[in-house]
């Protein structure tokens, strides 16, 4: 069949879709140019907020109406269970976020409708990749056991499971052999790698640097793989910002100077209600530790506005925390109750218009802060890996520095290859972009 995959949601979903693509190609199917051109369309869904779920379900509905064979995969499937066929009566198949490995067989058998939720299943095909480019995502931790009050992820992505470090190292080595130079290690709370189940065992050689914690030790092992120039990972919880993690940042220049560290709120009262297991002071201490090691260290975050009971004072605490933390970038989300989560039992009492206002205030603050933080980088030279031509301005290329900041420069008649290292001197900044010129 000619297939197309449409992906919503986070990097984990992007990675899962890539694995499905590789599996379908291995099974003899052909990638279509787009959905119009496809016989089979798989929609990979997100359910973190209600709107996200509606988008994926709406998309699948349109594709069904267009006469395609349609499969829905991912987080929304697990949340809806059998209800998915009430919402989409003519859907052909639906697989949960850990069951995507079954897709080639389901398509082969063609016995529709079919539902596979997968629960805590560990896909056998975690290492399936398509041949592509110099960057790759690598899943290291499945599921999540954090159980924050508002979050649907533990219900849909199952319990935590850390892949054996040996498997991760083998996967990254294979990718490096195919020209990959930047990997991003993925897990919902990736610093909990090796906490619920052991990731290292007695068959593994001891850590050369004496790392005792599973994740920093994994960074050490991945940094030792020839050809891997950059290592990123996401997402993090301040509880994982240990001295060993900072040591790994310091000792391995491949480990990028950036951490996405969702804070969610700056109010201790709300943080306690959310079950985040840190206080405002502890969060700020984690940020200070990273910036003490490198003042340019980039910290980005997620924030929820309008959590049940969030007062003006709680909101102002979030504002001031964001200022104190000096975030380099921030994603702001309006609280959306998710069925079955603990906070769904609380009244969703912040009016939509007020959530909207708080969202706008935080975004405006972040624009100013981003401009100020980036302004401190004017005149510095960034080591950039080139990604491709800028989508906004013709004649420019764009890439990222170690801090994950977007850097653009005028090509001035020169040609660049994706993944090429370019040293760029910063001349001018925007809240989320650095503009510069290449230097020798
Ligand atoms: N409502 C709004 N935002 C949410 N997030 C997670 N659950 C919800 C929810 N119920 C946000 C968090 C998380 C990001 C991926 O999505 O900020 O870090
Ligand atoms: Fe969406 Fe969360 Fe699932 Fe990612 S893990 S796709 S953000 S629900």
Image (spheres, helix red, strand yellow):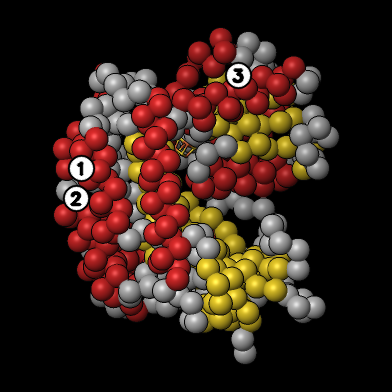
The vertical placement of 40 against 277, above or below, is: above
Which callout, 1 or 2, points at the residue further toward the start of the chain?
Answer: 1
- Residue at image location 41% in from the left, 74% down from the top: 376
The vertical placement of 435 against 127, above or below, is: below
Residues tagged 1 and 2 counted as in contact (Cβ below 8 A): yes
In space, the residues marked 3 and 1 are separated at their CA atoms by: 45 Å
In space, the residues marked 1 and 2 are separated at their CA atoms by: 7 Å
Provide the residue designation for mark 1.
Answer: 267
In the drawing, does residue 431 fall left or right of residue 314?
right
Task: Report whether the residue tagged 1 is closer than 8 Å to ligand 1.
Answer: no
- Residue at image location 45% in from the left, 71% down from the top: 375
The vertical placement of 232 against 3, above or below, is: below
Rendering quarter of residue 56 = top right
Q: How many marks?
A: 3
- Residue at image location 25% in from the left, 43% down from the top: 316
**Depth-wise, is mark 3 or mark 1 nearer the camera?**
1
The answer to whether residue 31 is seen in the rendering is yes
Query: Which quarter shows the C terminus?
Result: bottom right
Provide the residue designation for mark 3.
Answer: 114
In space, the residues marked 2 and 3 are separated at their CA atoms by: 46 Å
The vertical placement of 261 against 9, above or below, is: below
In the drawing, does residue 417 fall left or right of residue 115?
right
Q: Secondary structure at mark 3?
A: strand
Query: Which quarter shows the N terminus?
Result: top right
Q: Secondary structure at mark 1?
A: loop
Provide the residue designation for mark 2.
Answer: 280
């Amino acid at each position: 069949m000619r297939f197309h995959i449409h992906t919503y949601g986070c990097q984990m979903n992007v990675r899962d879709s890539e694995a499905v693509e590789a599996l379908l190609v291995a099974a003899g199917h052909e990638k279509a140019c787009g959905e119009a051109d496809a016989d089979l369309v798989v929609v990979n869904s997100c359910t973190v907020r209600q709107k996200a779920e509606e988008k994926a379900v709406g998309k699948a509905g349109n594709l069904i109406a267009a006469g395609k064979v349609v499969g829905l995969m991912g987080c929304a499937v697990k949340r809806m269970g059998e209800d998915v066929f009430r919402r989409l009566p003519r859907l052909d198949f639906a697989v949960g976020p850990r069951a995507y490995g079954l897709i080639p067989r389901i398509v082969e058998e063609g016995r529709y409708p079919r539902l596979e939720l997968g629960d805590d299943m560990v896909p056998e095909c975690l290492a399936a990749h398509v041949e592509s480019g110099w960057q790759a995502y690598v899943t290291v931790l499945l599921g999540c056991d954090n159980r924050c009050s508002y979050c649907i992820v533990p219900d849909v992505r199952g319990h935590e499971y850390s892949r054996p470090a040996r498997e991760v190292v083998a996967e990254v080595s294979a990718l490096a052999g195919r020209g990959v130079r930047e990997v991003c290690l993925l897990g919902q709370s990736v610093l909990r790698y090796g906490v619920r189940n052991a990731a290292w065992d007695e068959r593994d050689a001891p850590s050369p640097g004496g790392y005792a914690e599973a994740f920093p030790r994994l960074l050490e092992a991945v940094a030792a793989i020839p050809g891997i120039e950059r290592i990123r990972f996401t997402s993090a919880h301040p509880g994982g910002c240990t001295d060993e993690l900072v040591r790994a940042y310091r000792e391995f220049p491949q480990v990028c100077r950036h951490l996405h560290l969702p804070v969610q709120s700056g109010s201790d009262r709300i943080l306690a209600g959310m079950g985040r297991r840190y206080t405002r002071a502890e969060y700020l201490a984690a940020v200070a530790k990273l910036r003490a090691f490198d003042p340019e260290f980039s910290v980005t975050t997620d924030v929820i506005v309008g959590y049940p009971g969030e007062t003006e004072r709680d909101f102002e605490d979030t504002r001031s925390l964001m200022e104190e933390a000096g975030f380099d970038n921030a994603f702001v989300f309006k609280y959306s109750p998710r069925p079955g989560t603990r906070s769904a039992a609380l009244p969703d009492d912040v009016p939509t218009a007020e959530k909207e206002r708080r969202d706008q205030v935080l975004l405006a603050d972040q624009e100013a802060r981003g401009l100020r933080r980036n302004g401190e980088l004017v005149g510095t030279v960034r080591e950039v890996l080139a990604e491709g031509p800028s989508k906004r301005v013709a004649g420019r290329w764009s890439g990222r520095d170690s801090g994950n900041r977007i850097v653009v420069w005028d090509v001035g008649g020169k040609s660049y290859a994706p993944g090429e290292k370019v040293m760029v001197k910063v001349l001018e900044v925007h809240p989320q972009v650095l503009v510069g010129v290449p230097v020798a």
